[in-house]
Each structure stands twice: as structure tokens, then as C-alpha cells.
Amino acid sequence: MLVNATEMLQDAVKGQYAVAAFNTNNLEWTRSILQAAQDSNSPVMVQCTAGAAKWQQGFKVVADVVADLVDYMGITVPVAMHLDHGSYEDCFKAIDAGFTSIMYDGSHEESFELNLERTAEIVKLCHSKGLSVEAEVGGIGGTEDGVTSAGELADPAECKAIADTGIDFLACGIGNIHGLYPDDWEGLSFERLSEIKAEVGDLPLVLHGGTGIPTEMIQKAISMGIAKINVNTDLQVAFARATREFVVSGKDLEGKNYDPRKFLKPGFDAIVDRAKELIVDFGSKDKA
Ligand code: 13P
């Protein structure tokens, strides 16, 4: 069932669990994510950056694949089709393409005022169409789609100002980083998370860079208001590792294993398995 993300994330705040938002890269990726969510009886967000949409030949292809698979696979758990880190221009394209949820990432705009102004405009447009909106304050560390941020702690006053535009959920930097965490990573700042929470109340908060954060830290963050956790690299690593094992063991040379349906299967099975583990860690299993 394709829905926006508002209700699933409000339910997550109330129930103290987080919904996984997995980035998709292609048809099989989307299929694996949907399979994992359905098997786990869990709500899920399938999300896509502009870069990954370009690879898949556009936002419309991505949105149509999600919608058609939800239908074809008989997916009954709530699924949101979400734009991840959209620029101002990307938001309009994704809305037209049929996404049910939009992240406008104005954290790279030249001023906070512009982020605020554009967020308010996107909220108005999305809400008139029944779509949910995520905004961002403070960069998330690491590099995503070629945009690098030094990684900062979001300013609680700015979080409050952006929350007041009527957004449905907020991404705020609390020391999290996209991609694999360096050995000298200092961990999440729970102090900053509680300061932000004090400003924004029950607004669902989003943790980007969900790959590689120790489970206890994830669970503590959930208990403090994190209701959506973004995961991309983790599933890529799971896919690559399983595919590598298949090749290194020489199985790719057996029979007709050159057939992509056979060659890629271990990787996709690995995505399903790993996504299911994360759904358990985030507490959303059986919360559909
Ligand atoms: P990771 O690649 O670190 O899992 O981060 C994903 C993310 O935050 C997408 O917005």
C-alpha cells in the first residue's frame, strides 16, 4: 500500500521504534526492500537520491517501479516513496513523477533564511497534494551525491524555526555521517539530540547515515525521538560482499550462472536478509 510517511512516522514516535528508509539503486533493490518489509510486517520507506534516479533514467521510472511492484507483489504493509536529499529543483521533479514523500535538503543553500523560505514553499505545495515533507538543518557528515558536509550538530533554534514551517519530519545533524564511520568517530551526540527534541516536541526526527552505528546507540536515539533511520551503504556492502563470495568461490562459472537472474541472486538475497535484520534492530517488525 503506497502512502505518504506522515502517519507511519507519527506512529513510530508514539510506539518508540524507527521506520527504516532504504535507498534504492535499481529494480531488484526496490524488490528486495519491499520483500523484506512485507516478510517483516513492517512499514518501510523506499527512498532515492537524484543521482540514483539519474542512474535509473529518471524520477518517474523510480516511482513507477515502486508503485508497480507494490501492486504486482501484493505488498500490504505501508510503503512511502521518498525523495532523499532533494535540491529545490529536484523536489518539483519528484512531485511530478509521483513520489509520495519529499525531502527538501536546504542545508546547502547559501543562507538558513533561504532554507527556511524554500522549505515553507515546498511544505505548502506538498501538503496541497497529500505528500509528506522532510527538511534538514545542519549538514550530515560524509559525501552524498557529490555533496560533502563537514558534519555538524544542528542548531536547536534553527530546528525549531524549520519545524514551525509545518514539515512532517526533520533531519538534524547529531554527529552522524554518511557512509562508513571512521575509526576515530566520536559517536552520536545525545546531548544535542535532547536539546533538539526539547524544541520540536513530538515532531519525528530522522537519523541519516544509519550504516555502522552501534545498535545500542541506535536504540538509545530511537528512545529519544528518532523515528526514521536512513540506510544506504549497509545494503550496498551486503550486496557486494555476497556477489564477491559468489565469484571468488568460482560459482559464477558453474552451469548457467552467468545468467543475471542467477549471478545477481546471492547479492539480492543478502539485501533482503540484511534489511530484515535492520528492521528488527529498529523495532518496526510487526508494526505495519
Ligand atoms: P548511509 O549510506 O551511511 O547508510 O546513509 C544513508 C543516508 O543517510 C541516506 O540519506
Image (cartoon, helix red, strand yellow):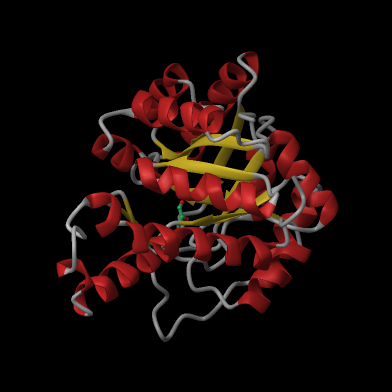
Residue 210 seen in this snapshot: no
Quadrant housing the N terminus:
top right
Question: Looking at the image, which residue sits at the far bottom?
Answer: 184
Q: Please state which of residues 127 and 150 is positioned toward the viewer in this rendering.
A: 127
User: Residue 30 at x, y = what percent?
Assistant: 44, 43
Q: For the point 80% across and 58% down, which residue is it?
A: 16
Query: In which image quadrant can residue 51 be found?
Result: top left
Q: Please state which of residues 280 and 119 is positioned toward the viewer in this rendering.
A: 280
User: Residue 221 at x, y = what percent?
Assistant: 69, 66
Q: Ligand 1 quadrant?
A: bottom left
Residue 279 seen in this snapshot: yes
User: Residue 180 at x, y = what percent?
Assistant: 39, 72
User: Residue 103 at x, y = what percent?
Assistant: 51, 37
Query: In which image quadrant can residue 78 be found?
Result: top right
Q: For the point 83% across and 54% down, which residue is it?
A: 15
Left or right of residue 220: residue 114: left
Query: In which image quadrant can residue 135 be found?
Result: top right
How many marks are shown on the rendered structure? 0
Q: For the point 40% across and 62% down, which residue is it?
A: 233
Question: Looking at the image, which residue sits at the far top?
Answer: 128
Question: Looking at the image, which residue sits at the far right?
Answer: 14
Quadrant housing the C terminus:
top right
Q: Please state which of residues 162 and 211 is positioned toward the viewer in this rendering.
A: 211
Q: For the point 58% across and 78% down, which residue is it?
A: 214
